Image (cartoon, rainbow, N blue to C red):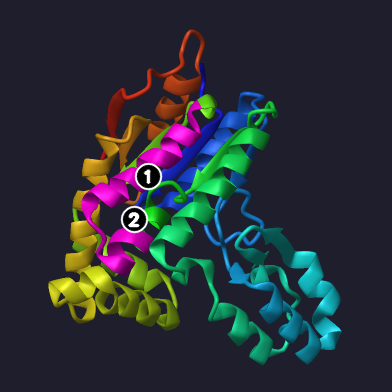
Amino acid sequence: MPPRLVVVEGLPGSGKTTAADVIADLLRSRGVACRVVFEGDPEHPADFESVALLDQATLARLAEAHPGCREELDRVGRRVEDGVLLGYGRLPGSTPEPLLDELRAREVYELPLDRHIRLRRRLWREFVAEAARLDVVHVFECCLIQNPVTVTALRDDAPEELVHSFVAGLVDDAAELDPLVVYLDQTDVDACFERIVRERPREWHDFFVGYYTGRGLGLAMGATGDAGTVRVLRRRAELEQRLLGRIGATVEHVDTSVRDLAASRTALAGVVDRAFGPGGGLLAGQGVSSTLPT
């Protein structure tokens, strides 16, 4: 069966956003209904983006302290057994900064790891159940490997078996969608990092370097500055390559080390042909590599 979930993964700067957009465009050109969801979308149906977890007492206190925001808090809140998930990224721009600060302090991606994994897998299963009823291909950017690896390995320096268990569990949960992972390989991690630093604002650089060197794995490696960040990125890339061979998903590798949009589109068109073409459909666990011409 052709996949109903395509997830584009790779290091920062590998071109995930562009690749997800190209894949969605290629599918639409074939008449395939699809929904593409990019990293950072506060309406993401299967991942947490700017979402806080609050208990009822905290939510009541915040609503009382900010009565003008009560309706908006209700609008973006959702009750779960752990409390209330509140998508603060969906609040209007007029939301008071002190309220946002309190919500950021309760970010789901900063929860203890076992609690985060439990919430994430519950949301993921709800998405799969809904997507299975739709005749739509979902194209996601980076929520299957990058984000789980970030919160487990990078944030907490968790054992590789725990990282694998988390990612493989997500793959298993999505089995009825026949997920396809498109992984964008980089032959030169240093160049990839240098490229994205040139393209993104200084604030992004400072946050990224601070996270990669100041959290679990970076601290364990004694990483500092840009050079230390690249060391952690290399370790992450090695870990992700090992995971790809173990998680049981169909994986397509595309080398995007050289920035060439036409070549990228050609390689991604081959991926789409193999997955959705006549008589196609990839076999689970089968990996195919595509190297872009330089």
Quadrant of the rendered structure where residue 4 is? top right
Q: Is residue 163 left or right of residue 101?
A: left
Image quadrant in which the C terminus is located: top left
Disc marking residue 167 = 1
**Which residue was labeled with disc 2?**
149
Estimate how packed mark 1 is, as few (under 14), some (14 to 19) or many (20 or more) residues with alpha carbons within 10 Å. Answer: many
Give the residues in magenta.
151-175
Which residue is at the far left?
A: 222
Q: Position of residue 275 (x, y in %)?
A: 46, 22
Circles 1 and 2: CB atoms closer than 8 Å: yes
Predominant secondary structure in magenta? helix
Disc marking residue 186 = none
Q: Is residue 195 visible?
A: yes
Q: Position of residue 36 (x, y in %)?
A: 60, 44
Q: How many numbered markers are drawn? A: 2
Estimate how packed mark 2 is, as few (under 14), some (14 to 19) or many (20 or more) residues with alpha carbons within 10 Å. Answer: many
Q: Is residue 21 visible?
A: no
Report the amino acid beneath label 1: Val
Please report the residue visible at 63 percent of the width from the left and 34 percent of the height from the top: 129
Please report the residue visible at 55 percent of the width from the left and 40 percent of the height from the top: 139
Residue 76 vertical placement versus 205 (above, below): above
Report the amino acid beneath label 2: Val
Q: Is residue 101 left or right of residue 180?
A: right
